[in-house]
Amino acid sequence: MKYKNWKVPSAPPVVPRSLEQAVGSRLLAAILHLRGLGGLDDAESFLLGGMETLHDPCTLTDILPAIQRITRAIDRAEHVAVYGDYDVDGITSACLLTDYLRSRGLRCETYIPDRLGEGYGLNTGALEKLRDMGVTLVITVDCGVTSLEETAYADSLGIDMIITDHHECREELPDAVAVVDPKRPDCPYPGTGLAGVGVAFKLVCALEGNTETMLERYGDLLAVGTVADVMPVTGENRYMIRRGLEKLNSGACQPGLAALMQETGVGDKRLTASTIGYSLAPRINAAGRLGDTQAAVELLQTSSRRRAEELARELCEKNRERQNLEMAIWKQAADMMAGHTPAGPIVLAGQDWHPGVIGIVASRLTDAYSLPAIMICLDGDKGKGSCRSVGGFNLYEALTACQDCLEGFGGHAMAAGLTIRADRVDELRERLGEYYLTHHSDYVPALEADLLVDDPALLDMACVESLDSLEPCGSGNPRPLLYMENATLDTLSPIGGGKHLRMRLLHMGQSYDAVFFSQTLRELGATVGQKVDLIFSPQINEFRSRRSVQLVITDLRLHGRRSAT
């Protein structure tokens, strides 16, 4: 059992008859009803919503002065730069805005800071380089909203700044020409769930005055960046991602993404948001994690199919290198945690850890322990940390409460970065532990299932296929998790070199094939013939032209065993 606590339904799903008739599936109708979409109008809007779901970009605070300054740069043929972040969201944002500005005749540089040498966000050295190149206007994407000193320094260099970001704002904003961030307290924009690439997209929509044209042109980059940054797949994001997936699946996407799809082996399959998250995004991210974003930027900017194929191969190789580094650090982290049962956030520090991959290890720790985790890479007396949270614990607020022992920090409720002196790591661990104990009372880590499978008909081919109508799925709109109790474990075998399990389950007179990823025989805690409960996501498996229902297990426990409290 991976999760200590399960939250499972005890009664069959409620299915409004009118909704079931409208969508043609009891399972889909039950899920929609559970998610507050039981009314026909609400369900139709969610499933079929179009351009009307998009908000007016001109309601973003400071968007008008941003448009005016960029228009002046176009009229005067100024030399401008787009300054991004080294993750997928930052790279897609930078490439989207750069392409648009170049199409308007501007000489435009794309500047992505080196993760290892420069770190996150604006830095004065980069601004000096851009000034020496003749740049008079810098537009940030996916960063900059907390860069007060750097923005002031740009002004001293004669460079105007436009900040576009989606991260949390501090009390004081940079003194820039414009600060466009939906999380500004004074911003009336209806949603705060835009990714950095979403804010950049809204800027080009406002500049162009035509959202439909821009969505058709940049939907692929918009979808990749939004999904990769784990933004809510709801509201306007849901529609924008869906349009981007249509562009990717049609083959009409830009050459770099098409080449990456082929290189990763997903080019001949129907792409979903999960495909972006698990196949495309890690390879684009790998370049930034290893301190070399140039290949990723060039991949998303090249018009040459042959060059795109070369760059896609290079990124896949970088991803393999990243995986090896990650595994080595994970083993060290696991050794450090051996024998410990932490009561609060996990804070680990080590010399010579690669700063580009510690965030992934932090995520693995949160999965393993259901606790926030911070991994700190030490270099002498200084440290850089990557932080990940879990459930409803707001990591950004926790770091804010501990900011006096940090050199700096920034990020979201669920993910953040920090810098710290090595001699204050123990203090941070203690302070975060104290904060956690007094602020996590409403947060009980639990695996929650949507509904109880009380009828085999819920898992027939048509019902499972109907769940595709919920796509794109992701944060805020997850793939449904179902609960099955008192099933018999009929067969069990390791696959993938023992890293995963395949099994067959018997339940209510039906037999179901299932897979349990990242679970070994030793960890399972159940053997053939035993009665088990499971939480899973059903999917259609296609193998040698044969289609069948397959259960992708999230967790499994012996029947009758209850959650730990």
Image (cartoon, rainbow, N blue to C red):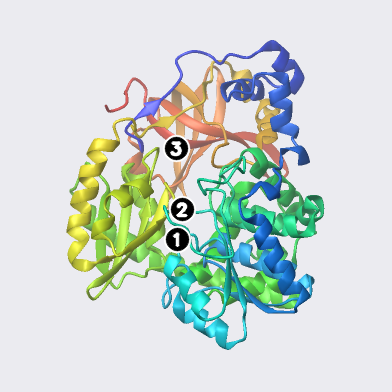
Total number of numbered labels?
A: 3
> For numbered disc 3, what is the local secondary structure?
strand
Q: Secondary structure at mark 2?
A: loop
Name the spot of residue 117 as percent of width and height, x first: 42, 78
Amino acid beneath label 3? Leu
Q: Taking the image as drawn, is residue 224 in sight?
A: no
Q: Nearer the N terminus, badge 1 or badge 3? A: 1
The amino acid at mark 1 is Thr
Q: CA distance from mark 1 to mark 2?
A: 7 Å
Q: Position of residue 509 (x, y in %)?
A: 55, 17
Check the image and report above or below for 390 versus 352.
above
The CA distance from mark 1 to mark 3 is 52 Å
**Quadrant where the C terminus is found in the figure:** top left
Q: Indicate which label's residue lies in the foreground, 1 or 3.
A: 1
Is residue 186 in view from this perspective?
yes
Which residue is denoted by mark 2 in the rendering? 169
Relative to residue 500, is residue 107 depicted above or below? Answer: below
- Please state which of residues 81 and 483 is positioned toward the viewer in this rendering: 81
Residue closer to the observer: 520 or 47: 47
Indicate the position of residue 487 as horizontal and vertical percent values. 46, 23
Name the residue at 68% across, 54% down.
202
| For residue 399, side relative to residue 106 (left or right) | left
Residue of label 1: 146
Which image quarter is the N terminus in?
A: top left
Q: Amino acid at mark 2?
A: Cys
**Local SS, label 1:** loop
Question: What separation in Å lies between label 2 and label 3 (alpha carbons)?
Answer: 51 Å
Disc sitting over residue 492 in the figure: 3
Q: Position of residue 514 (x, y in %)?
A: 52, 36
- Residue 530 to residue 347: above or below: above
